[in-house]
Image (spheres, grey):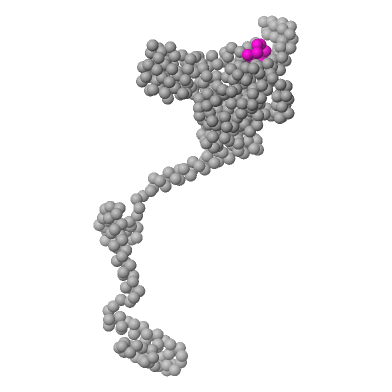
Amino acid sequence: MASSPSKHAPNVPMPNLSPPIPSLLTPHLSSPRSTRTLRRLQSATTLSSNYNATNAPSLITQQRQLQQRTGNIGLHRDLAAYQLPPPAPQSHSRTRSNSDAVVPSIPSHASTVKKSVMAKKTITAEGSSREEIDSLVRQGPKGDVLGNLDNLRRCILIDGIDADNDGMSHLRIYIWLILLNAPPISTDAYLSLIHRGPSPAYSKIRNDTFRTLATDPLFKRRVSEASLIRLLNAIAWKMHDVKTVLTSNDSVRITNSATELGSPELLHASPAEKHAQGESTATMTDGSEAGGPESSVYVQGMNVLCAPFLYAARSEAEAFIAFHRFITRECPGYVRGAMDGVHKGVALVDKCLAIVDPKLSDYLHSKGMHAEIYAFSSVLTLCACTPPLPEVLQLWDFLFAYGAHLNVLCIVAQLTIMRETILASPRYICSSSFGLFLSSR
């Protein structure tokens, strides 16, 4: 039973049997369970005796040893390829754990991983701020209006408005309308101004529109000259109507006699009413809304100021109300007949440059180059005349958020960027930003 010819190969020697089975199992040898137990013990004895007799590893053991040798060869090749120093000898006597083993690896990319993590955090922050802007535009402020406006300005300053490479954004015009506090306007109101036909300033408008950002392909591709003409003509009619109303009310204001305490109708008025009355009087006296010659209805440069609104807006009505609000509330002195607001802004450029960089200011003045010569168009158009147009839109995001008066400091910043180039040229400087021309003669 233990050595059947059908179960063993003829060339395999017969193994030595193990010691006799204890007498405890002897009475039960006839049972099937005892037979299976005996067979297992005999098989184990046979395997151990064969291993001791031949002292040769099994096929599985041989394969594992071959893989270990191949792995060691690959390890030495990797070490030679990466030129890693040999592992330092271990001074401790304990068995080395897996963490102490020298494993060949590609050079560490910890800095790259850190940069990617920081980039993901930045993208997350930008995404949250843009979601906040989108929610504010679509759903309106929740709770504190002034606090929401501050958050909007902060998001514009830090992350900017999401736009494509051409500067196009579906939110920009609505953010501008919010920051300018422009009232809504119906399309019919805008069409009624267009249907009135040519305004008193129509000929001047036609003389300027064809050269508005003529070298900018992005603007020419999106905005047509007909759109410019319609919008500027509607603005001229709107300002002409305001001038007519203020002129008709002029006789009423003149009949009021003022004393040392002020105008009689303002003696018991609230501070807000006094402020509004003072603004309307000042506008009537020097403003473009108060009447005067035709040049106060439209002045040269309004076409360039109007261009970014048409480029960013999704309709002419949106561009119309935003542009009208901007020129009548933010910079009314820029569209007056004498452009006194522009001249004051140019004078501020000279003063700010003298404070920020006295050496550069003295150098420009020594060449006879005052801001009146090189910065007039940049002040008048809020740098809209300086390409590229997508960067102009980003600048206007900032100016509408924190005030159009900061355009003066932006012009000074452009001069300081060009400082070394200007000072290093003794004869002349040509700049696409300002059209700057200096000559030592």
Q: Position of residue 255 (x, y in %)?
A: 74, 6
Image-based side of 103 in relation to 289, left or right:
left
18 or 404: which is nearer to us? 404
Seen in the picture, residue 102 relative to 342 is either above or below; the reply is below
Q: Position of residue 427 (x, y in %)?
A: 37, 16
Seen in the picture, residue 73 relative to 216 is either above or below; the reply is below
Residue at (33% x, 73% y) in the render: 61
Magenta stretch contains residue 215: no
Magenta stretch bounds: 288-296
Residue at (49% x, 18% y) in the render: 375
Seen in the picture, residue 417 relative to 48 is either above or below; the reply is above
375 or 87: which is nearer to us? 375
413 or 431: which is nearer to us? 431
Q: Quadrant of residue 130?
A: top right
Main SS class of the magenta portion in the image:
helix
315 or 25: which is nearer to us? 315
Q: Position of residue 405 (x, y in %)?
A: 54, 21
Seen in the picture, residue 104 relative to 193 is either above or below; the reply is below
Task: Tell me the quarter of the image containing the C terminus.
Answer: top left
Q: Quadrant of residue 14?
A: bottom left
Q: Could one spot residue 140 in this view of the protein?
A: yes
Q: Position of residue 165 (x, y in %)?
A: 52, 36
